[in-house]
Amino acid sequence: MTVALVTGSGGLIGSEAVRHFAGLGLDVVGIDNDMRQEFFGAEASTAWNVRKLTADLGDRYTHHGIDLRDRDALAKVFASYGTDIAVVIHTAAQPSHDWAVRDPFTDFDVNAVGTLNVLQNVREHCIDAPVIHCSTNKVYGDRPNSLPYVERETRWELPEDHPYYQGIAEDMSIDQCLHSVFGASKVAADVMVQEFGRYFGMRTAVFRGGTLTGPAHSATELHGYLGYVMRCNMERRTYKIFGYKGKMVRDSIHSHDVLTAFEAFFRNPRSAAVYNLGGGRFSNSSHLEAFALAEKISSKEMITEYVADNRVGDHKWWIGSNAAFQADYPDWKQVYDVPMILQEIYEANVDKWVEGAPR
């Protein structure tokens, strides 16, 4: 038996990882206790995705509804598979700035301590298994906001002669800036993954994602940007724009492109690797530009409300550079851009996200 162990297996990237690695011929063990429902309410529950994985994959998928903070339960899962575990994809997290402020203990315990629990179990039970960790561009805090942006008609933008015009690289400092409570817990996890790679010689990769998206997202206001734009448009909800005139820029990468990157690392792993991974210049949009695309796809006008104050630590502009990853894995290529992503989200939910749908 060759096993891929996936934490957060009911979420967007987690569920795509389950399908992707099952498609490669691995048996997949998923860990997910649907805390997303606790974080964001019933509409964000991942239970439907777990049911679908179980139905679609049959005995190729084994689910464990345990909490990453439960060290004894987690250790039992790892011990039961031992060295059969060929790769660990760690996607489970508390993903919201706003929620972290309300309950910083849970945020840190899930994001930082939960990651430590996973790493220590890999060290004890399957030390040769590559560990793929979903980090975030929020580890850079609000430092990207110090860049010299210029205001365009629909977006904030960097001058074309700026070193980061093609995308922010991993050499941007994470120190002496405002992170938000969520960003700080993710920094702790990010650095710990690197440390287990360096200190114990484990094969670990930190992927600092921008906006990770796709049709399997349980989109909600506090997490799931493009999916939530499309959902608001289709269900006739009001989308709240938080600051920056709606011109804040996000790069967006489709779950398919994320998983092909993960597969590339799995096949040729390194130790303590750190990569920005996002849409880059290939796939990005401002909020205003995403609204226009959603309106074109659905033929429905967006309903929006502007809130002058931006969220604490929120980026005015984020386009990450994938150059470091592409230098190590030159065969990896992106497929999906923002219009393709929104079109797919629309088509996947056209019968579900309708006006008057239960929330």
Image (tube, rainbow, N blue to C red):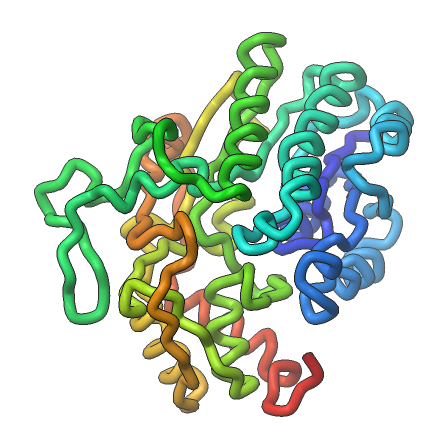
In the image, 192 versus 352, the foreground residue is 192
Residue 263 in view of the camera: no
* 355 relative to 325, above or below: below
Q: Quadrant of the N terminus?
A: top right
Residue at image position (60%, 16%) is 196
Residue 319 in view of the camera: yes
* 278 relative to 307, above or below: above
In the image, 243 versus 91, the foreground residue is 243
Residue at image position (47%, 43%) is 180
Q: Farthest left residue?
A: 161
Residue 322 left/right relative to 231: left
* 96 relative to 197, above or below: below
* 167 relative to 57, above or below: above
In the image, 278 versus 93, the foreground residue is 93
In percent of width and height, residue 332 lies at 42, 39
In percent of width and height, residue 349 lies at 60, 77
Q: Quadrant of the C terminus?
A: bottom right
Residue 352 left/right relative to 182: right
In the image, 37 versus 300, the foreground residue is 37
In percent of width and height, residue 224 lies at 53, 61
Residue 291 left/right relative to 94: left
Residue at image position (73%, 21%) is 122
Residue at image position (58%, 30%) is 189
In percent of width and height, residue 183 lies at 50, 40
Give the number of callouts: 0
